[in-house]
């Protein structure tokens, strides 16, 4: 279904180069939104479990697990946790343009707030909330000039974020020389679909398919973590990959 990129990602050729450069300091140039494979939803053995230990299974679950939001995980600005099921159809949404990319919005999902820089935040503590947050974050990286602010507000705190912020500062200093002559944003991107890889109460891993205006499609892995009442992205990265169709993904688009 997929093949790894053998040619430059169009996201890195125009405005998206700003976000791509910052992620290079963490792992790979092409990724802005990313996935760290974690076994955070693997249950711990019970304290009184006397059964012998078994070796880890390599069996892949056919469907992601249903998540359960914790009582302590209320959204910072009010959206209820709501339905904790994994979406199997396109979620209902009102789409709003952020720059040239449309993002999904919904009163009971989010975003609940938009900062003075134009950064979207405050989503429901649910798998659907994580999907909305991931897509909104992708648009923010393209539309908001201050990449450092996007990372500071929307990335998971830690050494990876610190490294990405430092790289972003350098990228913002050098971006005028990095941009190709005649940059006018003629290549645009829109969400085309998504797939939830795994979902626990506080970690949702997914892939979002982006379609460029030249017809090329790429799947971008994203790992969203619930912290301080909102979803934030993990700043570790995995290379995005080109896809030829939406087979295996849930089609979802607003433009």
Image (cartoon, helix red, strand yellow):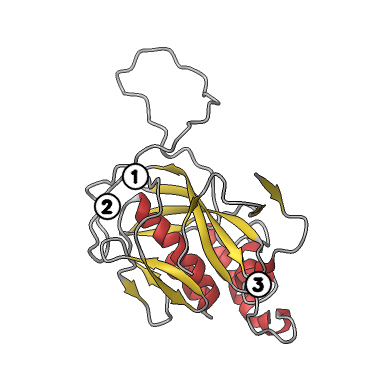
- Label annotation for residue 53: none
Q: In whole angstroms, how far apart are the C-alphas of marks 2 and 3? A: 34 Å
The residue depicted at 40 percent of the width and 45 percent of the height is 88
- Say whether disc 3 or disc 1 marks the residue closer to the N-terminus: 3
| Snapshot quadrant of residue 64 | top left
**Crowding at label 1, few (<14), some or many (≥20) Cα neighbours within 10 Å?**
many
Secondary structure state at the residue bearing disc 3: helix
| The one of 121 and 248 positioned closer to us in this rendering | 248
- Say whether disc 2 or disc 3 marks the residue closer to the N-terminus: 3
Residue 246, x across and y down, in percent: 57, 51
Mark 3 and mark 1 in contact? Answer it, CB < 8 Å.
Answer: no
Please give the residue where the numbered disc 2 appears in the rendered image: 73
Residue 241, x across and y down, in percent: 65, 52
Q: In whole angstroms, how far apart are the C-alphas of marks 1 and 2? A: 9 Å
Measured along the vertical axis of the image, is residue 128 above or below residue 116? Answer: above
Please give the residue where the numbered disc 3 appears in the rendered image: 17
Total numbered labels: 3
Secondary structure state at the residue bearing disc 2: loop
The residue depicted at 69 percent of the width and 68 percent of the height is 10
Secondary structure state at the residue bearing disc 1: loop
Residue 225, x across and y down, in percent: 41, 53
| The one of 211 and 10 positioned closer to us in this rendering | 211
Residue 99, x across and y down, in percent: 50, 79
Q: In whole angstroms, how far apart are the C-alphas of marks 3 and 1? A: 33 Å
State which mark lies toward you, 2 or 3.
Answer: 3
- Say whether disc 1 or disc 2 marks the residue closer to the N-terminus: 2
Please give the residue where the numbered disc 1 appears in the rendered image: 201
Locate the N terminus by quadrant: top right
Mark 1 and mark 2 in contact? Answer it, CB < 8 Å.
Answer: yes
The residue depicted at 59 percent of the width and 76 percent of the height is 169
């Amino acid at each position: 279904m997929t093949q790894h990129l053998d040619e430059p990602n169009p996201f890195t050729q125009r405005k998206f180069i700003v976000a791509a450069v910052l992620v290079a300091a963490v792992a790979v140039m092409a990724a802005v939104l990313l996935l760290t494979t974690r076994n955070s939803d693997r249950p711990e053995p019970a304290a009184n479990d006397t059964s012998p230990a078994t070796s880890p299974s390599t069996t892949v679950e056919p469907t992601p697990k249903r998540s359960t939001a914790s009582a302590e995980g209320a959204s910072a600005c009010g959206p209820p946790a709501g339905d904790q099921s994994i979406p199997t159809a396109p979620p209902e949404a009102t789409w709003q343009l952020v720059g040239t990319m449309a993002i999904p919005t919904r009163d009971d999902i989010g975003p609940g707030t938009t900062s003075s820089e134009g950064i979207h935040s405050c989503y429901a503590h649910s798998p659907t909330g994580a999907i909305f947050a991931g897509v909104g974050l992708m648009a923010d990286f393209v539309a908001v000039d201050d990449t450092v602010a996007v990372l500071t507000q929307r990335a998971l705190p830690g050494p990876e974020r610190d490294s990405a912020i430092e790289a972003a500062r350098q990228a913002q200093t050098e971006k005028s020389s990095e941009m190709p002559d005649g940059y006018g944003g003629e290549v645009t991107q829109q969400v085309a679909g998504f797939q939830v890889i795994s979902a626990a109460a506080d970690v949702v891993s997914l892939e979002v398919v982006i379609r460029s205006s030249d017809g090329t499609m790429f799947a971008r892995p994203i790992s969203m973590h619930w912290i301080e009442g909102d979803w934030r992205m993990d700043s570790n990265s995995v290379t995005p990959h080109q896809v030829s169709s939406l087979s295996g993904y849930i089609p979802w688009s607003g433009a």
